[in-house]
Every structure is written in C-alpha cells, then in structure tokens.
Amino acid sequence: MRPVAEILRETGGLLEGHFLLSSGRHSDSYLQLAAPFQHPDTAAELATGLAARVRARGIRPATILGPALGAILPGYELARALGVRFVFCERAEDRRFALRRGFTFAADEPVIICENTLTTGGSALEALALARAEGARVVGVAVYCDRLEDPSTVFDVPYMALERFALRSWAAKDCLLCRAGSVPVKPGSRPVGGLPNR
Ligand code: ZN
C-alpha cells in the first residue's frame, strides 16, 4: 500500500501548521482521522493494511469493538477486512462506555479493540475494560495512527498500529512557533476533505 502519511496528507487527515490542541498544548501538526474515512476506497486501503498487521501477529479475533463515534467506521472497515463481526460501545448517561442496541459478547470471545487514532489511549483503555467486564477476552488493540510515546506502557495486550507519528507539541509558553510570531488555530476551524488528488 501507499505510505500512510501520503494517504493522510491527500485526504486532509494529516494537517501541518500551528495548532491549539484540546489539551491546551500547541503542535506543528494534527491528525484528523475522520478525513480519510470520508472515502470508502481510502478507508478500505487503510483497513487492509491494519488487518495485515493483525494477521502478522497471528491474532484471530471473533469481533472488533470500536468506541463511538470516531471508531465506528474505522472499526467496521477493519472487521470487514478480517471477515469478522463489529460492535461499538457508546457513552451512557453517566458518561461511561456501555454496550447498547442488543450488542453482547459470548463468554471468552476473542475481541480486538480498534481506534482510529490514539493520543493518550484513554478511550481504548475504557473500551478494553468494558469488553472484559462483559465477558470477552481482549486479544489486542489495533489503531490506524498513534502519537503515543510508548504504547507498551499503556496496554497489557498486543498493540498494533498501522502508522506511528512522532508529532511535536509544546506547552503554550514554550511553543517555538509562537516565538517565531505565528498564531495557533484550533484544528477543524479550516475545512478538510474534498476529493483525493488521484
Ligand atoms: Zn504556539
């Protein structure tokens, strides 16, 4: 497959500039993984790549679990590429993840947690805890793109990422881009998308 960074750049999934992140930090780049999943053929290309990572580890899930909303399409496409079932969890009234809509796991069912992108891994960890509480056996975490420094310290199951990005960020007072005189923008304040340039 083509380089993931190339696919992301041409679909607006990898933005480069000067960004104010939701954490308050400033960054020179931003991952917007909803962007490539606008395009079914691009989504399938990425999912085929991630499915190959799963197969290469010899991991055979029965079901993919993706946290709503962001991981519904990415998780569904991974499930399609692996030929398995997909379910999603969503936040209930108490803001905790829950399985709704009649979704269940069989006892000891092998499940992979899928996310489109990880920054801290927090929501993937919550989904992992939910799957275990619902009786599943979590056999891996599969992610399209991450910017984690060291995923081995985050998860206690095999971790697979299609692409890893070492994106730079700074506390606002230390931002090199601010010092150079530019002003940060919130990601999403500029439109992304349109047709891939192919
Ligand atoms: Zn800045």
Image: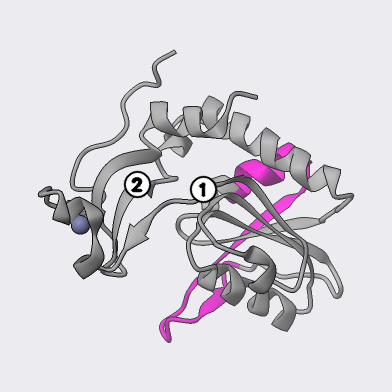
Q: Position of residue 45 (x, y in %)?
A: 61, 29
**Quadrant location, the N terminus:** top right
Q: Position of residue 114 (x, y in %)?
A: 63, 56
What residue lies at 74% left-to-right and 74% top-to-bottom?
156
Q: In the rendered image, is residue 11 in sight?
A: yes
Q: In the rendered image, is residue 184 in sight?
A: no
Q: Residue furthest right?
A: 58
Indicate the amino acid at tag 1. Answer: Phe
Kindly identify which numbered label has been placed on residue 114: none
The residue carrying pointer 1 sits among few (fewer than 14), some (14 to 19) or many (20 or more) residues within 10 Å by Cα, namely: few
SS at badge 1: loop
Q: Which residues are magenta?
A: 75-101
144 lies left or right of 172 = right
What residue lies at 73% left-to-right and 41% top-to-bottom?
51
Position above or below: 121 against 56: below
SS at badge 2: strand
Residue that numbered label 1 is attached to:
165
- Residue 186: name its quadrant: bottom left
74 lies left or right of 108 = left
| Structural distance between the alpha carbons of marks 2 and 1 | 10 Å
Q: Are dots 2 and 1 in contact, CB under 8 Å?
A: yes
